[in-house]
Amino acid sequence: MSQPNTPTETVSIQHSARQVAIEVITNILLQQGSLSTQLARHQTSVASEHIPLLKELCFGVCRQYPKLNSIALHLLAHPFEEKDTDLYATLLLGLYQLSYMNTPDHAAVNESVEACRLLKKDWATKLMNAVLRRYQREADEIIESLESTPSVEYNQPKWLLKRFNKHWPEQFEGIVDASNTHPPMCIRVNESRVSRETYQSQLQELGIKSTAGEFSPSALYLKNAVRVGELPNFEEGFASVQDEAAQLSAHILAPKTGEKLLDACAAPGGKTGHLLEQAHPLDLTAVELEPWRMEKIESNIARLGYQANLICADAGDITSWWNGEPFDKILLDVPCSATGVIRRNPDIKINRKPADINELVEIQRDILQNVWKTLKPGGHMLYATCSLMPEENEQQIRHFLAQQDDANEVPLNSLAPELTLEWGMEVSHGRQLFPMVEAHDGFYYCLLQKTA
Ligand SMILES: C[S@@+](CC[C@H](N)C(=O)[O-])C[C@H]1O[C@@H](n2cnc3c(N)ncnc32)[C@H](O)[C@@H]1O
């Protein structure tokens, strides 16, 4: 039976948000899934009004992980054993609250000590108390002594900094800055329902200030983030939340009514929806590997009022899903290191390892080579990643073009001559976009055509 909310209850629910945050961060540290999957799985155990606190704690610890990790290792005489990763997560959360949140210091320390008890690790209470109290006293000196370490200075993992510096020395500072800041809220106006100008005026009338994106004709940046429910006709599909760089996919592919399209790695369906907005009806097939992500595509395109042929399969295993009818156009938004969108997926700072890049390159190669077979002669494929690693981008395409004699690279505005190509930077194959403060994410695009 539900009980009225008493002050004591409120405290215990908030406490549970911290407990759940410990579980989420522990699982991330143990490489048991991404922040988004962990949050999706665990946030149901927190009262809805405390979900923002849960998110703030989890996103915050991931965003600040390189710094917090260095501080924690500095404070501990011996690192925790793997079986005590939950204690390490508790310590990181305690340090995060002391450094970045308004939580009173004594509450942050007491909560962390109490968490040791709830984890049935009473033996660690004294240690937790001592370590956090020392940090309270000596924070400034500790931070100063660590500041010259690149991973602390730039708040990014050392291996990633090395790669950014090696591949993009001129863009290095910008990449790091943008990767450490909150992304702006960018929306995509559904141009089949309303023009960007009209929608911008409707926003203005509601007091929501926005500026038009420079590169995507459908993009509006909101001055301040709002809940999607506040956007005019959101439920009717007049707008979607989508980064400006991601919006370029559908503008580059410029689908035409009646064409047969494939969106080969489709979930959560942001680009699927945009392709359908561009031309309707469209014979669109969306393939996605993960069964649990299919629902997202479905609900996204249902809100926009469209349908598509949704298939849950490994896009690279074409015999399992393809009926042999070739596609006019293909969007291949392959799984990647997501190094262009660290600010949206800050758990990359914890989870991503150098070896992942080679593994991903192999997966992408397999999908690319196999899905290419489903493209009509004369048809176009847009290869896309949200990665900044040349191995996944221009080098991947170089390898593909060298061994595929029916493939040509064509200019990114071949299908939409009106589209500006002033975004990002031309690289040996395709264009690389870098994440920008208050602007678009990091992305990569290359347009390929199959010879007749
Ligand atoms: C970069 S995300 C796609 C984002 C999507 N295009 C959008 O704009 O919303 C890559 C997606 O590919 C899926 N995926 C990974 N391997 C796959 C495979 N072999 N076949 C099909 N989908 C795959 C992942 O589960 C993930 O949902």
Image (tube, helix red, strand yellow):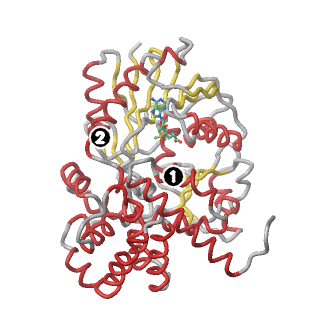
The residue under the point 57% across, 29% down is: 286
443 or 206: nearer the viewer: 443
| Proximity of marks 2 and 1: CB atoms separated by less than 8 Å | no
Give residue 357's mark.
Answer: 2
Mark 2: give few (<14), some (14-19) or many (20+) Cα within 10 Å.
Answer: some
Horizontal relation, residue 69 to residue 242: left or right = left
Q: Is residue 106 above or below residue 36?
A: below
Check mark 2 vs ligand 1: CB closer than 8 Å? yes or no.
no
Q: Which residue is mark 1?
A: 38
Going by the picture, which residue comes out furthest to the bottom? 137
Instruction: State which mark lies toward you, 2 or 1.
Output: 1
Residue 375 location (% of width, % of height): 47, 19
In the picture, the quarter occupied by the N terminus is bottom right
Frontmost residue, 170 versus 183: 183
In terms of secondary structure, where does tag 1 sit?
Answer: helix
Q: Quadrant of the C terminus?
A: top left
Which amino acid, mark 1?
Gln
Instruction: Classify mark 2: helix, strand or loop.
Output: helix
Look at 69% across and 50% down and name the residue there: 238
Q: Amino acid at mark 2?
A: Ile
Residue at 50% x, 81% y: name it: 103
Numbered disc total: 2
